[in-house]
Image (cartoon, grey):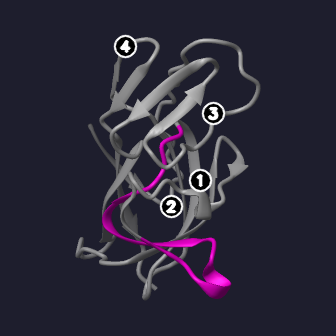
Amino acid sequence: MLHRLPLVSGLTLALFIVACGGNAPGPAPIGSGNGSSSVGVCVAYQTEPVFRLASAKNALTLAPIPTLTLSNVAVSGQSLDLQTVPSSLAFGIQMGTGAGANTLQCSPPCGFATLEGPYTFAVAASGYQPSTVRFDAFYQNNVGNCPLHQSGPTVVDLVLQPL
């Protein structure tokens, strides 16, 4: 499933949440770094991040944008500490350092989180207007009950406006 998201509209995709077992308070953890997380009393195993930022393109020329800076990442309205991103499933990213310690450098395609839900983050790229991205991320394939095996990320394409 491919979604084109023009950043100027703040388009939101349909939300789909899969829960297994129990009425645990609050959101499930991002993941332990080994591709698993708890949802209530059930364990969910992920084989890849919940979303794949597949591409970023110039809105006028459709030329690819090679590097993006992602910051102010939130899922389900909760700020995400990017230092806790499970590195075993992340791809196409580098963690920011120094003053940019809570940023990610993304070279599309990239992906980095396993928690399903609504995502919001700031996107910046040299020569482009800063933008905010909003979308709902969910796994396309959910196999089993407890344990639950999840795969098939939500695919996101970005279009940025040049300065």
Q: CA distance from mark 3 to mark 2?
A: 30 Å
Residue 43 among magenta residues:
no
The image's mark for residue 144 is: 4
- Between the C-alphas of marks 1 and 4, the distance is 29 Å
| Mark 2 or 4: the one toward you | 4
Q: CA distance from mark 3 to mark 4?
A: 18 Å
| Residue 50 vertical placement versus 9 (above, below) | above
- The stretch of residues the image draws in magenta is 94-115
Mark 3 residue type: Ala
Find residue 16 and report its horizontal and vertical position in percent: 49, 25
- Gap between marks 1 and 3 measured at Cα: 17 Å
Residue that mark 2 sits on:
8
Could you tell me which residue is drawn at 47 percent across and 27 percent down? 44
70 with respect to 64 (left or right)? right
- Point out the frontmost of discs 1 and 2: 1
Q: Nearer the viewer, mark 3 or mark 2?
A: 3
Above-or-below relation of 76 to 88 = above
The one nearer the camera, 71 or 22, is: 22
- Label 2 amino acid? Val
Q: CA distance from mark 1 to mark 2?
A: 13 Å
Residue at image mark 1: 120
Quarter of the figure that contains the N terminus: top left
How many other residues sit within 10 Å of disc 4, few (<14), some (14-19) or many (≥20)? few
Instruction: Specify the amino acid type for callout 4.
Output: Gly
Q: Residue at x 54, y 75 (%)?
A: 130
Element assignment for label 2: loop
Q: Residue at x 71, y 15 (%)?
A: 23
